[in-house]
Amino acid sequence: MQVILKQKRKYDIICCKKKRLIDAKLRFFYSILTFFLVFAFPLLPGLSSAKLVMVGLCLYLALKRDSWLKLNKINVNFKKAIRSYLSVHYFLFFWTFFLTIYYREFDFSLTSMWLSSLILYYVSFVFYTKASNYINIPKTIVYCFIFQCLLILLSMFCDTFYNISSIFRGDVDKIEVYGRLRGTAICGYQFFGLATMYSFVLLYYILHIKLFKRKILYFIFLTVFALLNGRFSIVALITGIAFYFIREILNGQLKKAISFIVIMIVFIISLIVLLYYYVDMISDPFLYKVVYNYLVQPLDSIFIDGEFRTPSTDYLQDMYESKYIQQFFIWGSGRFMDEAGGYFGSVDAGYLRILGYYGIIGFIFVFFSLFYLIFLTRSNLDIFTKIAFFCLFLAFNYKGDVQVYHNNIIPLMVAFLFFNKATDCDRSLGIVK
């Protein structure tokens, strides 16, 4: 009898080890697929990593037995979660199509974006539903961005890795202009597009920093590489710290809030002062260029010229003073891109582009769709993060077009809004009151 019991225990141990090994492999597999979906880097002409995930998902549903029954359940959950946002999205899709036909512009670039974004909302939801059985979706996305930081570092300082990985980058022609200062991520989106992605992840991380172990290390990585991809990411850093402070006060954690703010401010100021005064001691020419362009030059414009100025801010100011695009602010133009494929009216600021295409009425509808997605869908994300996200959308649209129809933002929004289980169940962390 004892021999049988020992054999049974041994068999149970072996089965348990096999199960843990299988679960570990599945967690790694879905983490890789999440990286593929979020960063959508090019694999072949016309095929990105995100499209590969979509194709794989379709094949899985087509070949797996009883998969269509499970898909029907996911469809029900999708409709429950997103509520009437689908109707808002459909309306804006047809309104966008109608305007360009009405004005005889026949520019369907924005119409196609609304259509592709709807597909990506659904695909992201289906994929995350399956992946959430094995991984924590929001945490995995944060880890994907940490891993991306390491890839960017390798690309900056290792010529071999940069050359090998060049095929996995979008906007390769523009990358050479920056001399590998920016645009070195393994990603289909670069520059401002990637900066917005890093900014939303950084904002989420700051407001959920208690859920992570290596808090300071991850904070440094996300902050540095968000700013490296776009200096406008400083808005996300300020917004995150401000909302963290407000939330902790409302949760009765005044001392913790003050200590967190003091630590962050002291750390940031110390780093800035150290780099500013000792920039000439940096021997590496590439690192010197990074520090000078992103720190010394902006600070000199403040201390010497008495105002914050960069070529980017000067260009942004010129766009907002453009008289040509302003003539379309009332009724719209029905054009998003010009005939040569550039920005219509030579402006890329979000508010100007949306007003230029839709006019004031459509502009209101577009931002209502943003409001509905964040606040009126069935999301378990805490209200502080929702408000912070909304504020960040409003701030970033001043600089560039960052909206709910942009494919680089959609996988992040679906993950944070609809798969954020931690803030919903673990109130002991003080994330929700």
Image (cartoon, rainbow, N blue to C red):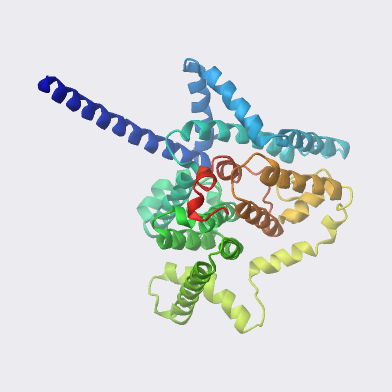
Q: Nearer the viewer, residue 181 or 331?
A: 331
Q: Nearer the viewer, residue 170 or 135?
A: 135
| Residue drawn at (54%, 44%) of the image | 420
Quarter occupied by the C terminus: bottom right
Query: Which residue occupies the extreme bottom position in the image?
Result: 304
Q: Nearer the viewer, residue 177 or 111?
A: 111
* Residue 197 drawn above or below residue 260: above
Q: Residue 274: where, in percent of width, then height?
A: 44, 78
Q: Residue 110: where, in percent of width, then height?
A: 73, 41
Q: Is residue 343 left or right of residue 362?
A: left
Q: Is residue 390 left or right of residue 245?
A: right
Q: Is residue 13 left or right of residue 320?
A: left
Residue 179 visible in image: no
Quarter occupied by the N terminus: top left
Q: Nearer the viewer, residue 206 or 331?
A: 206
Q: Residue 261: where, in percent of width, then height?
A: 52, 70
| Residue drawn at (60%, 29%) of the image | 77
Q: Quadrant of residue 237?
A: bottom right
